[in-house]
Amino acid sequence: MTTKPSPFFSSFINTIGVRFVLLPPGSFMMGSPENEPGRYDDEIYHKVTLTKPFYISTTVVTQGQWFKLMGRRPWLGYRGLKSETVKEGDDYPAVYISWDACSLFIKRLNESENVNKYRLPTEAEWEYACRAGSTTAFANGDIEAAPVYGPTDVGEHRSTIAVDYDDPNLDDMGWNCGNSDLHIHQVAQKNPNKWGLYDMHGNAWEWCRDWDGDYPSNGVIDPMGPQAGVYKVIRGGSFHHKVRICRSAHRNRGGPKPKGGSDDLGLRLARDL
């Protein structure tokens, strides 16, 4: 795997081979405007200000990086029955990772480097990093696929415009059900966003630090989500999913406890200065 350092920000590679870029503090509009195709009603458009710089990894944690630290292969799946959708190799995403397993991985990584700086990104940090200064559905532009009009239910939330077709902007940056052949791909094979981050759209869902909860309607500073909850936030969409699910603003959630995991769920690391 070869990833290029961001042309804008400082970067480093840690002891297990994860490359990080340093993102500056800033403000952005989180969520989606009401006229964005594929929008769900939990994507309340609101201003977020992040007051501290932070590092974020340029890719999700790979199988090689996970095994180097943990010595086990959770991507083999529940009871060792590997899904046909999961490919094995050092440069493929580490998947079948629960939120609790993320916590243990991060604990061991901090201990191995004698620091207390590695963590998961907050949901706000994740979207800030994904957008890389953009205000469009994807980091490289708006949805160009032809929309299908009509109500669409996903869990508790509704979309009035279902965008289900291949999209050239998404295809340029991420693996989705329209171009993935319905299996996971090696990291950093698509184009990065302007901040040098790969696969923020599609390929594998990514855990966030926050408990799932409603967005505020007003501006917020350094949000971290509810203090407690049932589900943890996951972001980004995956190789299984359609265009609307891989948008920058799309939200999803998962239970933190291990239950066999998922063939398209991994993690991207954040790090404090």
Image: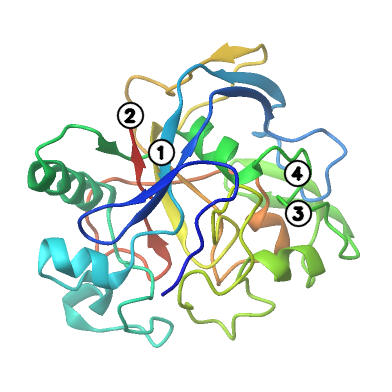
Q: Is residue 57 left or right of residue 73?
A: right
Q: CA distance from mark 1 to mark 3?
A: 21 Å
Q: CA distance from mark 4 to mark 1?
A: 29 Å
In the image, 223 versus 150, the foreground residue is: 223
Q: Residue at x 66, y 50 (%)?
A: 194
- Mark 4 or mark 1, whichever is nearer to me: 1
Bin the neighbour count of mark 2 within 10 Å (Cα to Cα): few under 14, some 14-19, many 20 and up.
few
Q: Is residue 270 left or right of residue 244?
A: left
Badge 1 is on which residue? 55
Say whether disc 1 or disc 2 marks the residue closer to the N-terminus.
Answer: 1
Badge 2 is on which residue? 273
Secondary structure under the numbered disc 1 in the rendered image: strand
Badge 3 is on which residue? 140
Q: CA distance from mark 2 to mark 3?
A: 28 Å
Q: Residue at x 25, y 72 (%)?
A: 64
Secondary structure under the numbered disc 2 in the rendered image: loop
- Residue kind at label 3, given as amino acid type: Asn
Residue 164 in percent (x, y) is at 77, 66
Quick check: 25 above or below 179? above
Is residue 43 at all visible to an observer of this figure?
Answer: yes
Q: Residue at x 80, y 33 (%)?
A: 33
Please tell me the numbered disc located at residue 128. none
Badge 4 is on which residue? 39
Callouts 1 and 2 close, C-beta under 8 Å: yes
Quick check: 164 above or below 54? below
**Exactly how many numbered labels are in the figure?**
4
Bin the neighbour count of mark 4 within 10 Å (Cα to Cα): few under 14, some 14-19, many 20 and up.
many
